[in-house]
Amino acid sequence: MLAEVIFFSRWLQAPLYLGLIIAQGVYVIHFMVELFHLLLNITTITGNTIMLSTLGLVDIVMIANLLVMVIIGGYQTFVSNLGKDNHPDRPEWLSHVNAGTMKIKLSIALITISSVHLLKTFVGIEEVSDRAAKWQLSIHITLVASALVMAFIDRLMYKPQKESQKEPEKTVA
């Protein structure tokens, strides 16, 4: 009975994924508002402002991509099989998702989002304090280092067998 309760407890995560879907909806609305502001001021804004606005839109898209990976991958990995193996729109990465690959993919997504923020900071460096820029760079370097360590540990844990340890290939006669 205890095992059944423990196994069923994974469903407590389902409302969390629903909450992330709602948060993604908020990002869609925010994206549309920012795009509307960009279009509304198209004749009066500078190239630098267009670039910063566009980077803001890219940032929103990257966060939305991160949410999709967490929602779909997390649900598939930790709650239940989605049952979409033959669906034509099924993401390719879903076929080989596990907790290790999810961590690596999420790390890469966070680094990409951090890179966009850092680029926005560098483009508008006059408006940012040296302290804030240094903190952003430090956080970015920490994310990169963390991702490298996680990838290294993941590789150690799932190290492919050496040629001599592999089973001999079977030939069909």
Image (cartoon, helix red, strand yellow):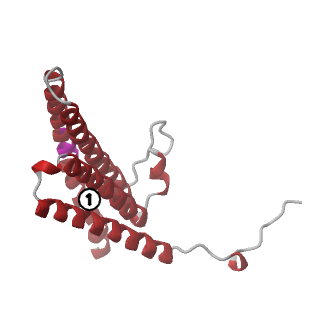
Q: Position of residue 39 (x, y in %)?
A: 18, 23
Counting from the top left corner in percent of width and height, residue 161 is at: 63, 75
Q: Residue at x 28, y 41 (%)?
A: 58
Q: Find residue 77 and report its image quarter.
A: bottom left
Residue lying farthest top? 43
Q: Which residues are magenta?
A: 21-25
Q: Residue furthest bottom?
A: 165
Q: Position of residue 60 (x, y in %)?
A: 23, 43
Above or below for 158 versus 112: below
Q: Which residue is mark 1?
A: 11
User: Quick one: SS at disc 1?
Assistant: helix
Give the residue displayed 36% in from the left and 67% down from the top: 147
Tell whether 37 sits left or right of 75. left
Q: Depth check: 62 or 9 in front? A: 62
- Quadrant where the C terminus is found in the figure: bottom right
Q: Residues within 10 Å of mark 1 (few under 14, many from 20)?
A: some
Q: Is residue 44 magenta?
A: no
- Residue at 32%, 74% in the rendered image: 3
Quarter occupied by residue 35: top left
Q: Report the amino acid beneath label 1.
A: Trp
